[in-house]
Image: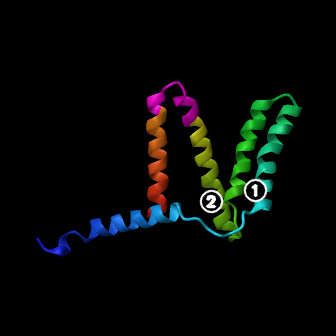
Amino acid sequence: MSENEHPPKSLKLDTIHAAFKQAFEIKKNPFPWIKALSAGIAAALPVFIGLLFGNLAYGLLAGIGGFTYLYVFNQPYHQRAKKIFFVMVGLALSVVLGTLLAPYQLGTAIMMGIIGASVFLYLVH
């Protein structure tokens, strides 16, 4: 058996190892307090308004959109709009799956594994 038959597997393992290393790397950058506070306000304000007007459920649903603020960086508008759209769809899908699978512990565990694996594979790729 020659060594040239197995490089793709070794390359994948190296990529996964590098992704794990980056995931647990401690960075020296300061914490972005302004962005964190703005995201908190963007998520809490719709909930507060919904509570104020007597419809907490609508406020909670509107507050989900506030999480998309965390994913917005200094990018061109078309990239930003595409990213916000997919974040919105992903969060909505997660809420729907969480609601449907809440009574089933095994289903919830499996779905969390699938979501985690898909995000990990997306980051590695």
User: Residue 96's spot in the image, x, y percent?
Assistant: 58, 36
Q: Amino acid at mark 1?
A: Ala
Q: Which residues are magenta?
A: 97-107
Front residue (pair 46, 82): 46
Q: Is residue 89 above or below residue 9?
A: above
Q: Classify residue 108 as left or right of residue 77.
A: left
For residue 17, the mark is: none
Q: For label 1, count other residues whose C-alpha is less than 10 Å away and answer few (under 14), some (14-19) or many (20+).
A: few
Quadrant into which the C terminus falls: bottom left
On the image, numbered disc 2 is attached to which residue? 83
Give the residue displayed 65% in from the left and 70% down from the top: 28
User: Residue 56's spot in the image, x, y percent?
Assistant: 79, 31
On the image, numbered disc 1 is attached to which residue? 36
* Coloring applied to the structure: rainbow
Give the residue displayed 76% in from the left and 53% down from the top: 39
101 part of magenta stretch: yes
81 part of magenta stretch: no
Q: Is residue 54 above or below residue 114?
A: above
User: Residue 116's spot in the image, x, y percent?
Assistant: 48, 48
Q: Which circle's residue, 2 or 1, is located before the other in the chain?
A: 1
